[in-house]
Amino acid sequence: MRREKLLAYLYLLLMALGCTGELVFSDLANPRARLVLKGTYETNDPYGWLPFFNDDAYDSLVAPGQPLHNTDFHTQTLSHGPQHLEWYIDLAEVRLGQGSGPGGGRDAEDYWEFFSRQRLLLCSRYDALQDKELKSCRQEEGLAKLEAFFGEGVEIKANDVLVGTYNHLALYYRKIITNPALLFSDTGSFLSQSTAIFENRGVRGTDIAERYQYSALGGNATLLFPLERKDLKLNIPDENRPYVLEVRTFLKNNINRHIIRVGGLGTTVYFLGPADFRINHRYNTLLESGRLGGNILMDGRIYQPGKVGAVDVSLITIAGGGAVNYKAAIPLGDSFDPQKQLAYAATRGDGMEIRNLPPGSYEILALCDKKRRATGDVLEAGFDGFPETASPPCAQVTITEGSTVISPPATCSCP
Amino acid sequence: MTKRFFITLLLYHFLGVSLFCQFEEESWRFRPQIGLWFGPVTPFPGSALSYYLDTNLGGGIFWRMNLPSDTWRSEVGTSYSYYDSRFQSALHTVPVYGAVDYLLPIELPLTFYAKLGFGAMYVFSEPNKRENWHPLMLLGYEASFPAGKWVNIGARIDYFFVYEGYLRPPPHFPGYRVVNAHLLKFGLMVNFNLSR
């Protein structure tokens, strides 16, 4: 019996040593990760919908004396405003990776951390063509989610991934359909409305994801993840508290009237989509639509909702602003190229506050839309909704957890 | 609480051993068995973890002996099961338990046992690498038939209730829900009679 007693005590001792106090099942059932998706430039308090801008190709064709001046094309499309705009968005996946992509002995399953495989359906209406309806979008309340997507963000179910720093963020938009999208003859008379497929149903509009997510001219036609960034520093903290991965796809208030000619068919295609801020597209041929690739800018950041502060920017004024302006906060010491990334955190030009900033020092600056991409790929004076111009930093603030710092009065001048 | 579980459990087990010594002279004979099983494991459908983990495979080993009674046996066992998911989440479990097995009075060439046991489970979760030992309760059911003198073949179902509710939620995590695990293990089983 003595030996058995000893064994019993030994067993109990091992047990006692094994108790770590860690929550294991609950850790699985309470993911720390939260994924918030936004379709805005702003990280909080975005603008409402602003009027559309015109692409330079559009403007040059409807100018007095030009072929499409005062045609059906001109009158119909010019009347379009945000109240007519409809979206049908199907987001398939959000993934994270460390490195430059699968390959080199690592297959896709090993490379990617699957942050979310929840499909997100957003739509402006539930009825499809031929008296059908968009059932899944209705079930998932896609209307309300669309509003959130272009507002303070839509949260979708996410999963914990390994703690670490990720440079690679990939979004797979299966569809981004905008309506109105119309077809005209080359002389500007109305032919028909474009239709596209969403949720296996016909809807009015055209799928701009095909045009914007890859560059046919750049030779990147078959990317698995056409919308990706490999230059990010997404640090997932090793702390048992929730964190938010906020992913912004800049669509709202960046909408231009575009025109592209389908050569040979004698058809002129009109659609609404983000500005061609990166490479200019022209009217002449269908090939020009390939130049739209890369014109959807995406950015992501991670913060812990319990460990953030805010800055009151009501005393910041913007001088030399353009059609759309933003007030932005950039972590001190970070480089920032307004034509390659979205500002770390931003609010609309007349916004009062920039929120959800992790503690640290930030520079405040303004971003202004004063230019657009035109023939010859030059930036000319004009408006396209994309803020190509950044002011020099005009104020500096230090954010502390749980409080709002008031930025000193300053004027941010866009050159 | 945990410690008391195990003291009771172990005492019960050793009681069996010591009683066996006294009854050796009678017609009852000591018939220990050692067994192996493997089969699918899954979180109980509808339980909290079933939304985060998928079905996978597990396997285990157990040792069993008859108590000085023809209808009761005692069993100790351990196993390993792995549950993964479509995401990065995964769970590894190693239960260590002691149980009493009751021979159900069913007149068939098969042998049926119902089991009740207690023990502890080592659990390790991914991707956040949390680990712990948690108290468990086992409810089991088993059906087997003899395949010759030394071998029995059968199937078993074990339901494990693993208690985590004694832990507090982390302080900076609003809406955190502490959950317990309900795990099911189905096994195809072979056990060997160590004596006749």
Image (tube, rainbow, N blue to C red):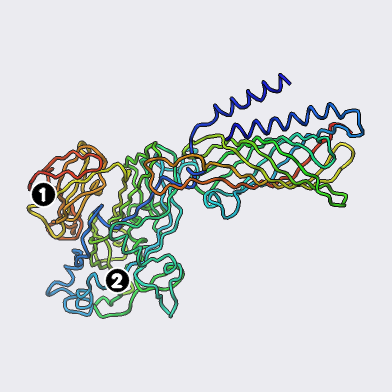
Query: Which corner quadrant holds the C terminus of chain B?
Result: top right
A268, B61: nearer the viewer: B61
The image position of residue A201, as x and y in percent, is 44, 72
Say which residue label 2 marks.
Answer: A269
Which of the labelled discs sits on residue A266, or is there none?
none
Alpha carbon distance from label 2 to label 1: 42 Å
What secondary structure is found at the residue carrying circle 1?
strand
Q: Which of marks 2 and 1 is nearer the N terminus?
A: 2
User: Is B128 left or right of B46, judged from the image as shown?
Assistant: left
Closer-to-camera residue (A222/A253): A253
**As drawn, A183 above or below B123:** below
* Residue B84 seen by the camera: yes
Q: For the residue labelled by badge 2, is the local secondary structure a helix, a strand or a loop?
A: strand
Residue A316's label in the rendered image is: 1
Residue A272 location, quadrant: bottom left
**A395 in relation to B9, above or below:** below
The chain under label 1 reads A
Asked if residue A414 can be seen in this view, the reply is no
Q: Which of A391 and B44 is in front in this view?
A: B44
Residue at left 83%, top 47%? B111
Amino acid type shown at disc 2: Val
Left or right of A54 in this view: B125? right
Find residue A391 and report its horizontal and vertical position in percent.
12, 47
User: Is residue A244 depicted above or below A164 in this figure?
Assistant: below
Q: Quadrant of residue A146?
A: bottom left
Query: Whole-percent x and y of residue A86?
Result: 31, 70
Foreground label between 2 and 1: 1
The subunit letter for the residue under badge 2 reads A
Q: Where is residue A56 in the image (x, y as percent from the top left)?
A: 18, 63
